[in-house]
Amino acid sequence: MPPVSRRTLLMIAAALVAAGGLAWMLRPQPVPVETASVARGPQEVWVEDLGRTRVREVYIVSSPLAGQTERELLHAGDPVKAGQPVVLIRPAASPLIDTRSRKDLIAAAAAADAAVDLARADQQRARAELTFAEGQWTRGQTLARSGVIAPQLLDQRRLARDSAAAAVASASAALVVRERERDSARSRLADPSALGAGRCCETVRAPVSGRVLRVIRESAQVVQTGQPLLEIGDPADMDVVVELLSSDAVQVRVGAPATIRDWGGDPLPARVSRIEPAGFTKVSALGIEEQRVLVYLDFVRPDEAWGRLGHDYRVTARIITWSAKDVVLAPASALFRQGEDWMVYRVVSGRARLTKVRVGHRNEDVVEVLGGLSPGDRIVAYPGDRLADGVSVTERR
């Protein structure tokens, strides 16, 4: 066998080095992953939604009559006391009547005057009959004591006297009715410009003490009977109302702790005071019909903590539906579905091991682990599509 030249040896060595380098470059590289530890600790589960503050008892002051309001001097936020005048209303004049209606009213007024005269004449006749019956009764008593008339005749005279007295009372009442009818007929003929003479305005007073929450009718303007003018309430008596989805509301119980957030200050503790038994339909911003339920929350701290809140302010309410002090917890981001099962990748000796877990309660951060993991286990926090069972991994620092 001829000796191998030095050049050949060098070429063989270079080929071996190149092959080794290629093999080193093509070897499987560990997948960098972020890991987290399974630990024990407290956990809370909550429902969260937008809510608004509200004064519990809002009193709407409305107009008791049709007229024109004087310009409102009160403004939103002004304090008021019960019985304090808050609005002045000038009564509206009656509308003008046409000629035919006026003639009808004149005839009705004349008939009412005649009816008064007739009732007054009936009253006078009844009084005369009563005077005669009383005289007959007095003479009958004298004759009865002398034995001139029988007791039965005396009873008849007593009945006649009592009937005459009742007739006088009936005639007097009828006269009063006819006089009121006459006054009503005359009032309908009164000059509209003379209505309200001698008085300026009707005074509307505050029903309770508190503050003006909203002035609905600020400028002087014409209002109708029952039209709202302003709202009064006590800002110190305030709670929060939240519109929860009905599927979330069934998980909430009265007395459950809650937190008021995103109101412009530190989170405020609260408690569920009432859950309405009936829901209502509301269309979401996406045009989807949702069944909502009103849930009411009371503040736990005194009003110094939330005194800057006003009526109808928007807040975020987080209501606790379940809590535990010591459970096994894993990051919610580490779990993923495989069929009907929940799975995680557990890091064992530098490799990812696919592990089935049983989960319980969960929130947006952590999940309660009922089986499959133990405290201290390292798991992949954010599993990606490069992971598989047995793949070599390295923790990303």
Image (cartoon, rainbow, N blue to C red):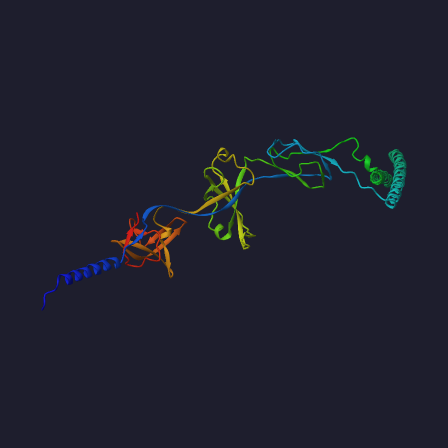
Seen at 56% across and 35% down, the residue is 235
Tell which of 365 and 135 is nearer to you.
365
Q: Nearer the viewer, residue 182 or 372?
A: 372
Residue 147 in view here: no
Q: Is residue 13 above or below residue 154?
A: below
- Could you tell whether 345 is left or right of 272 in the image? left
Residue 357 in picture, x, y percent from top left: 33, 56
| Numbered marks: total | 0
Determine whether, in the image, residue 332 is placed left or right of residue 145: left
**Occupied quadrant, residue 267:** top left
Where's residue 307, x and y in %?
51, 34
| Residue at image point 22% right, 59% down | 18
Q: Position of residue 221 (x, y in %)?
A: 71, 38
In the current view of this chain or complex, which residue is farthest to the bottom? 1
Nearest the camera: 139 or 52? Answer: 52
Lateral position of residue 312 relative to residue 2, left or right: right
Q: Relative to 119, is 372 on the left or the right?
A: left
Asked if residue 16 shows in the view, the reply is yes
Q: Quadrant location of residue 209?
A: top right
Picture coordinates of residue 109, whole percent (x, y): 87, 41
84 and 116: which is toward the camera: 84
Position of the N terminus, as image quadrant, is: bottom left
